[in-house]
Image (cartoon, rainbow, N blue to C red):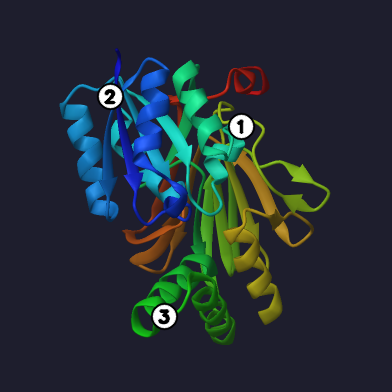
Amino acid sequence: MPRIAIIINHQAGSTEQVATARIEEILRAGGLEPTITVAEDGSQIVAAAKQAVADRFGTVVAGGGDGTINAVAGVLVGNPITLGVLPLGTLNHFAKDLGIPGDLDQALQVIIAGHRIAIDVAEVNGKLFLNNSSIGIYPDIVKHRETQQRRFGKSKWIAFFWASVNAARRYPFLDVQLDADDESLVRRTPFVFVGNNAYTIDGFDLGGRKTLRGGKLSLYVAQRTGRLGLLGFAVRALFGRLRQASDFDALLSDEILIRTRHKRMRVSTDGEVTMVDTPLRYRIRPSALEVIVPAATDASN
């Protein structure tokens, strides 16, 4: 039977409902030989993915939310290995955009069927992301949410609320210069959003993506707004529901360069916040990652 590595994030939102024995049973019934690793944190996820590469697995499946998928994909890109996805997180933007079902049994059947496509990935200063990256109020809120949780043991959503309120009080803005193709923008903004491929616009909502094979980055830059508007940006960024109206600049490009007076700044990539040296150089990497998807996704992508 073909070997397959499964890496499950123990902290994923749906982990309580996951039985590794059931995953193994279904995959074996489908003709696959799984090796399952349950990781306690991000470092263990990355270590397990690196071990799977060293052990020459042809397919590595990431079970968790968008952060888990990003961590595993970051190891696989550049290797002849296919990524599988079990969407066990809270929001699962990546899985939804690829049409991967949220039901565990159905997602396992997608893995068994093994239909593959090559998709684009994006990166900022060499750090990979599958969904989007942002600077400004959103990574600031995420960082303060983590602090609230560590200090006071609050739930993720309560901590996010208080971190958002604190950020709005500070009323943070960035002075940025954005260069993309032959266009240059100078803006004072609370929020810059860069997506891996174009996000669809439904009325005034910026939601999911129709394709991850368009070969373009999407850039959205918020104009000045009040404190309540800042909260709205942060909440919509979290749920992938930004609004594109007259208060946004938007464009598509292969590469984007962002300059600011800060030597280092917080940057969010698929929900993970790290300090990154400036300037920020974003680029698209077309067809850099092979992913297992439902057969119908091939037609829609």
Q: Is residue 232 above or below residue 291?
A: below
Crowding at mark 3 (Cα within 10 Å: few <14, some 14-19, many 20+) = some
- Seen as rendered, the residue at the extreme top is 1
Residue at 58%, 83% (x, y): give it. Answer: 165
Residue at 49%, 16% (x, y): give it. Answer: 113
- 144, 292: nearer the viewer: 292
- Residue 243: tell me if it is visible: yes
Label ID, residue 99: 1
- 292, 222: nearer the viewer: 292
Between the C-alphas of marks 2 and 1, the distance is: 24 Å
Instruction: Report helix, strand or loop for mark 3.
Output: helix
Crowding at mark 2 (Cα within 10 Å: few <14, some 14-19, many 20+) = few
Identify the residue under disc 3: 148
Instruction: Report helix, strand or loop for mark 1.
Output: loop
Disc 1 residue type?
Answer: Gly
Between the C-alphas of marks 1 and 3, the distance is: 34 Å
- Residue 284: tell me if it is visible: no
Q: Is residue 147 above or below residue 215?
A: below
Disc 3 residue type?
Answer: Gln
Marks counted in the figure total 3
* Sooner in the amino-acid sequence: mark 2 or mark 3: 2
Between the C-alphas of marks 2 and 3, the distance is: 38 Å
Q: Quadrant of residue 260?
A: bottom left
